[in-house]
Image: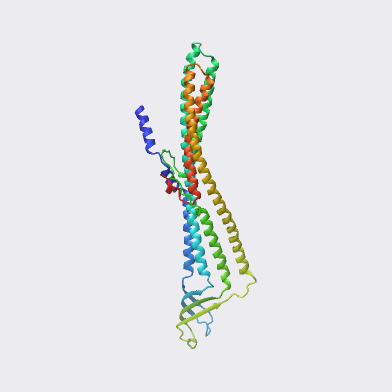
Amino acid sequence: MKKLSLIILSSLYLHSENLNELINYSMQNQLINSVKYNIEISQNKYKSIQNSYLPNITIGTTYSNTDNETISTPKSSLISYANINYTLYDGGAKGLLYNSYESTIKSTKENLNSTKNNIALQVINHYFSYQSLLSQKKAKQKEIEQLNAQYDRLKRFLKAGITTSDEVDKIISRVQTANVILHETELSIQTILHNLQYLTEKEITITTGSTIDEPVVQTNNLRADIKALEFSMDSILKSAKAIKSKNHPIISLDNTYYNYQLDYDNTTYNNNLENQNIFKLNFSWNLYDFGKISSEYQSIYKQYQSLKSKYEYEKNKASVDLKLSIKAYEIAKLKIASALASLKAANSTYETIQSKYQNGLVDNIAYLEALSEKYNASSQLKKAEYDLEIKKANIIYHSGKNLWEYIK
């Protein structure tokens, strides 16, 4: 039985995922795939626009039969044609539309990067929160072990009449409270594992050891979601200008070659026309349309202004978020120093109280308080250390860097 347990534990350990593996799994989920499809959609639309500006070639055939032929309408006819059409100048709309779609593609790519970073940040938060809760769980389990040992000791003293029942009851109460906290911690751990399952789309176990590199702050670098807004803004502006360019002259070429097979009952109508080529150079200019193009331009330009306002707001907010994340990081480092001092004091106090308690110099309450403080201090130190890793990740995220490049 012991061997079987070791095999199961070994198997679980071998299949445990570190932070890099968790992020790699999450980068393959359906949400990421959805954003990737958006990139392909934008690219296909751009390709379609490019193709629409290439020469347009059309071929066709028309067969007709009439009851009463005339000189212009034979008894039967078969007319085939080939047409080529090409726009030489469209008022600059082509270049603007190309720029618009290029910006849209860049925006969707930045959206993909933003989605990846958001998911990576969530995974990092879950990973280190899990480690923190696991350390709390282990500390609470050790505390319960100590309490149970004291409970066994006091039970023997109670039987011997050396202690009172209320002392035993205090221990029982402490054990029950610690067990409740332990179960709540375990529930929080399971919740994190389920949240990670949503992101990775697989059942996972977690291994310890991953950390985040020290962040290098760059205040002039934009986050991917802000860049995406910037490119979207540019795309809409180019679209508005493309609409406005419809007021410019348009020049196009049109060439059609016809092949005629005309069958006249009356041979005098036969003009021996077998083929014909018609070349056209077209020029058009929209001089007045009752404000249609102007209104369309204003509508799209207002979209640009709306997005620009959102861009400025989000850019300013991102700058503030970065400053706050830096401040939070500095505070997190102070918390570790404080937690170290608290742990040192708690261990020292516990050793003193334990010695006095065993010699009957302090009561049960003082001992239990010292025991609780010792394990709480140990847990708080681990929590502070893992919280520092999360704060590092926040700085990297708000600095516009790819989080997965900073994991070790």
Quadrant location of the C terminus?
top left
From this viewpoint, is residue 353 visible?
yes
Is residue 172 among what the camera can see? no
Q: Residue at x 42, y 49 (%)?
A: 405
Q: 136 or 25, which is in the foreground?
A: 136
Measured as percent of width and height from the top left, residue 151 is found at 49, 19
Outermost residue toward the left in this view: 3
| Residue 125 place in picture, x, y as percent | 49, 42
Farthest-out residue, top: 161
Q: Residue at x 50, y 30 (%)?
A: 376
Instruction: Count every numbered label the image shows and give the total.
Output: 0
The quarter of the picture where the N terminus appears is top left
Q: Vertical placement of 148 versus 84: above or below? A: above
**278, 78: nearer the viewer:** 278
Instruction: State how the image is colored.
Output: rainbow
The answer to whether 14 appears left or right of 341 in the picture is left
Residue 39 x, y percent position in the rendering: 47, 57
Instruction: Tell which residue pokes out farthest to the bottom in this image.
Output: 268
Residue 213: x %, y % from top left: 43, 45
The residue nearer to you, when weighing 231 against 249, is 231
Decide: is 367 above or below 398: above
Residue at 51%, 25% (x, y): give it.
370
